[in-house]
Image (tube, rainbow, N blue to C red):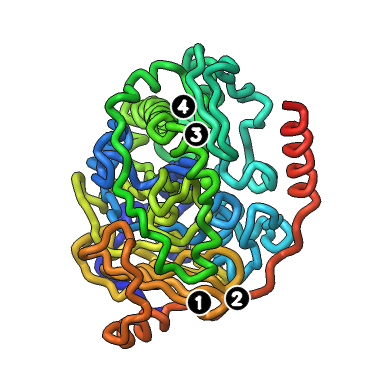
Amino acid sequence: MTPSIRTLAYTPLFLLAPALCAQGAPKPEKRPNVLFVIVDDLNHWIGALGRNTQTKTPAIDALAKRGVLFQNAYCPAPLCNPSRAAIFSGMRPGTTGVYENSHDWREVVSKEKTLPGVFAQAGYRTVGVGKTYDYKYERHADYEAYAERKTLGRWPVPKAEEMKTFGEPQWGPVDCKDEDTPEYKMVNYAIGELGAQAKKGAGAQPLFLAVGLFRPHAPWFVPRKYYDMHPRENIELPPFSENDLDDLPPPARRLVGEKVFKNISESGQWKAAIQGYLAAVSYADAQLKRLFDELEKHPKLKENTIIVFWGDNGWHLGEKHHFGKYTLWEEATRIPHIWVVPGLSKENTVCAQTMDLMDIYPTLLELCGIARPAHVQGDSIVGLLKNPSAVQDKAAISTYRQNNHSIRKGPWRYTRYANGSQELYNHDDDPYEWKNLAADPAHEKTIAELAAWLPKDNVPAQPVSQIFKDHLARQKAAAGKK
Ligand SMILES: [Ca+2]
């Protein structure tokens, strides 16, 4: 991996404080707190990224203004479990064999290798709430405290006549208050932790707090007021090309959920589905506002708390004839990503450098003065946080199933599937990836350069877990009952 810019010039604030232990390491109590915020299936339609202007995300946009917004950030895998397993373990899917939601990452990643495990070992109080790891494979023992799911209540459901079901996307407005929803309770729990940390004052044991919102993951069952914020008659469809799939190699074509897309569009529900997603995003944003506002109430805590905000994967809303994630295109891999680092990041900063979410782990360790374990992949971006206009020779890599990788670098997206077939897109004039340039000899050199970034590790997949088999059986039984 090409080294990123190293930051010899940057000295964390806590190192400047007269708090050095005999060995030269900062005393744990001088270390910054970390607020680690994950939003499930939040794609790049947030207001601050400008991809789609009909989204209403004032709280996320305000957070972006407080720090550095990464305009070109990509997830390591376009689905929940492998993406989270990679980011929390510091190891890519090709290293662990955790490629699917059916693969139990806990079999291959010990607590000592996870972010909360490493922070705990370094003396942090580690707390989690909501969906941090995939729900099927939670390991709450990685944290000192965790808000158990059963304490968050069940998600309210819409009336049967207002519920729309097309496979994974299910949506409909619910007549309930925010207070009746699990996200509201998750944020309450996190607010309690922040308040308690603020009360402890300077010198307290530092806090690593992970908060994982489940929405806008489907089903998009959220209070009606969020649907009313996005009237259906105002919904605009994303750019779309009828012939979009004609130049795709077979493995790419197989990723397209054409049946679901056709069912939605041909039954006149495309705009309604987008309304559902937008409503779920606005609902999530409203809950995040309460979380971020809480930090504003405690200026001293805020001054010593790093915020890392990320989506675990994107979502197509009809682009490339697809509704959902599970692809290696821009819609499923580009995600919102924001860093606020007191004393280091500047307000209102946008960074155009390609960002790979595997860099989160080593960056947090560096900022918190924790030694980097040997297994951790990625590069620290502390230099980029300090100087966001720095140009780094770096690519972002997304993996879906064994030995299928997509490389994003500069204007290019290059994808190579396990059977050797390829895609190449130039975002300078093709932001929706309609024209596959891979067969054009004029781009041979570009392809060779991009292919050099393909990961070398491509271990076989983990076995399908019993938990996943049971999950499928329950889903099948529930579908049979309807
Ligand atoms: Ca997800």
Task: Tell me, yes or no, whether the two marked residues, 4 and 2, touch with CB atoms within 8 Å.
Answer: no
Residue 69 visible within the image: yes
Instruction: Point out the tag, 1 or 3, that comes first from the N-terminus.
Output: 3
Identified at 68% across, 67% down, the residue is: 461
Q: Tell me the residue that label 2 is attached to.
A: 458
Q: Tell me the residue that label 3 is attached to.
A: 215
What type is the residue that disc 2 sits on? Asn
Instruction: Point out the tag, 4 or 3, that comes first from the N-terminus.
Output: 4
Element at badge 2? loop
Q: Report whether 220 appears left or right of 238.
A: right
Q: Report whether 479 appears left or right of 196.
A: right
Instruction: Point out the tag, 4 or 2, that comes first from the N-terminus.
Output: 4
Residue neighbourhood size for the residue with mark 2, other residues' Cα within 10 Å, grouped as few (<14), some (14–19), many (≥20): some
**Is residue 219 shown above or below 381?**
above
- The verdict on label 1 being within 8 Å of ligand 1 is no
For the residues labelled 4 and 3, the Cα–Cα distance comes to 18 Å
Task: Tell me, yes or no, whether the two marked residues, 1 and 3, touch with CB atoms within 8 Å.
Answer: no
Q: Nearer the viewer, mark 4 or mark 3?
A: 3
For the residues labelled 3 and 2, the Cα–Cα distance comes to 31 Å
**Is residue 307 shown above or below 381?**
above
Q: Report whether 27 appears left or right of 418.
A: left
For the residues labelled 2 and 1, the Cα–Cα distance comes to 7 Å
Task: Tell me, yes or no, whether the two marked residues, 2 and 1, touch with CB atoms within 8 Å.
Answer: yes
Q: Tell me the residue that label 1 is attached to.
A: 455
For the residues labelled 4 and 1, the Cα–Cα distance comes to 40 Å
